[in-house]
């Protein structure tokens, strides 16, 4: 799995990871119609059916479909009855990321360590089992209504988790080349960024990789600030954004308004061949933000030599940026639900460990054009 941290120099001491994570286990989204959402992620984004929980598995209050593509697992959950917590949160936020589950060796230890360091407990460690073995899980509260679940599955080899059964429909559109979650970006209110930066540092032992201020991320009208937090092995990364004062409503303000508070703004998923992946996504109906074609007139002067032909990048609207370690290619979808909230980033790293700072202005101007069309700028 890709990391954002280079190997330490031979003479540098190796620091102990105080909160070891093996990676992102799954991401659960609360959605209005889990069955239709599962079909969308299969048809449009190439996810494969994996597991199901609902009435036929003894679950009475919700229905969940699990889809997978390489190392990415999405759980799509909807309420089955009125008056549920799931329904309340979906009513407030629309389709939203509820849980970012983290894969650990020892879920009870991770939970108790986090709580001792100041995390708010949501669910004490508990074991569940079926014929495939035993799984241990526990939950803590993060920003807004987002929770982290610690998942210990070393003694479990079922299709997903106990309580789920394998889901094997005949409809299986081909994958599009998505590999793993590179990072997940959260939006918080003005003045809240440093609070959550410190929370991830103090509670979960994350380190700050990069900081961007309103001079780095601004246009004529709007601005934001961002700090990127990463766990010890670099497998879990959370850029945290807050709005900055501007002449008009920023994308962060728009998100907070329509989402009804803080949450995950976008999920960045990695590919080894962004041209073929984005071509497949486009052909399946995924819509992307576009920058002016003049962006490509001076692209190679700015980033130097790249392996890819320029014309397919121009045709698809793929952005390129370089840092000291190499370069990256990235593109952003439009929101994937009615509210202008959650979207996806497709990213291919060719050595780069950064986040596309050189593309910020062009990208944010593209977002502002969409805001203007929505009448929310």
Image (cartoon, rainbow, N blue to C red):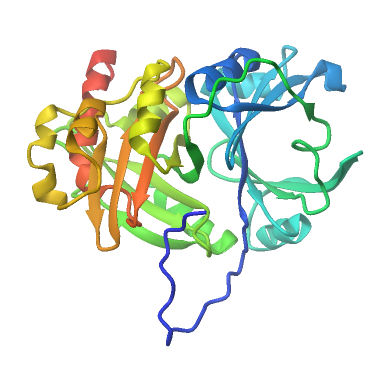
Q: Is residue 63 above or below residue 271?
A: above
Residue at the (58%, 45%) spot, across then down: 142
Q: Does any portion of residue 160 appear in the rendered image?
A: yes
As drawn, which residue projects farthest toward the bottom? 11
Q: Does any portion of residue 252 appear in the rendered image?
A: no
In the rendered image, residue 24, in percent from the top left (x then y), is placed at 59, 47
Would you identify the image quadrant in which residue 29 lies? top right
* Residue 347 falls left or right of residue 155: left
* Residue 63 falls left or right of residue 197: right
Residue situated in front as seen by the camera: 192 or 21: 21
Q: Is residue 273 above or below residue 42?
A: below
* Residue 89 falls left or right of residue 346: right
In the rendered image, residue 293, in percent from the top left (x then y), is placed at 13, 28
Residue at the (37%, 44%) spot, across then down: 348
For the image, the number of numbered tags is 0
In the rendered image, residue 217, in percent from the top left (x then y), is placed at 23, 44
Would you identify the image quadrant in which residue 12 lies? bottom left
Residue situated in front as seen by the camera: 234 or 81: 234
Q: Is residue 60 above or below residue 13?
A: above
In the rendered image, residue 278, in percent from the top left (x then y), is placed at 36, 29
Would you identify the image quadrant in which residue 228 lies? bottom left
Residue at the (48%, 59%) spot, across then down: 198
* Residue 172 falls left or right of residue 317: right
Q: Where is the C terminus found, in terms of image quarters?
A: top left
Residue at the (24%, 38%) spot, across then down: 319
């Amino acid at each position: 799995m890709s990391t954002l941290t280079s190997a330490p120099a031979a003479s540098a001491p190796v620091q102990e990871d105080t909160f070891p994570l093996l990676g992102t286990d799954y991401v659960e989204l609360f959605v209005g119609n889990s069955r239709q959402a599962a079909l969308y992620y299969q048809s449009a984004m190439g996810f494969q059916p994996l597991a199901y929980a609902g009435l036929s598995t003894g679950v009475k209050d919700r229905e969940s479909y699990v889809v997978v593509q390489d190392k990415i697992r999405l759980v799509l959950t909807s309420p089955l009855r009125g008056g549920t917590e799931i329904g309340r949160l979906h009513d407030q936020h629309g389709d939203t990321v509820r849980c970012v589950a983290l894969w650990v060796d020892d879920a009870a230890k991770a939970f108790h360590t986090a709580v001792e360091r100041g995390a708010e407990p949501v669910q004490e460690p508990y074991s569940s089992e079926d014929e495939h073995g035993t799984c241990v899980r526990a939950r803590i509260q993060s920003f807004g209504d987002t929770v982290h679940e610690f998942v210990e599955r070393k003694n479990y080899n079922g299709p997903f988790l106990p309580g789920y059964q394998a889901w094997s429909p005949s409809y299986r559109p081909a994958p599009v080349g998505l590999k793993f979650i590179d990072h997940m970006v959260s939006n918080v209110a003005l003045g809240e960024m440093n609070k959550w930066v410190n929370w991830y540092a103090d509670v979960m032992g994350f380190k700050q990789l990069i900081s961007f201020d309103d001079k780095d991320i601004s246009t004529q009208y709007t601005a934001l600030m961002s700090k990127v937090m990463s766990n010890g092995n670099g497998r879990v990364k959370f850029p945290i954004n807050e709005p900055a004062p501007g002449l008009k409503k920023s994308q962060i303000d728009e998100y907070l308004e329509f989402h009804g508070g803080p949450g995950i703004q976008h999920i960045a998923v990695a590919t080894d061949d962004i041209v073929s992946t984005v071509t497949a996504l486009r052909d399946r109906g995924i819509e992307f933000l576009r920058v002016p074609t003049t962006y490509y007139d001076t692209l190679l002067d700015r980033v130097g030599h790249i392996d890819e032909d320029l014309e397919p990048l121009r045709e698809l609207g793929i952005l390129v940026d370089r840092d000291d370690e190499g370069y990256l290619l990235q593109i952003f979808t439009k929101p994937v639900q009615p509210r202008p909230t959650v979207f996806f980033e497709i990213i291919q790293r060719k050595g780069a460990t950064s986040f596309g700072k050189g593309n910020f202005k062009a990208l944010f101007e593209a977002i502002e054009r969409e805001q203007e069309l929505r009448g929310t700028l």
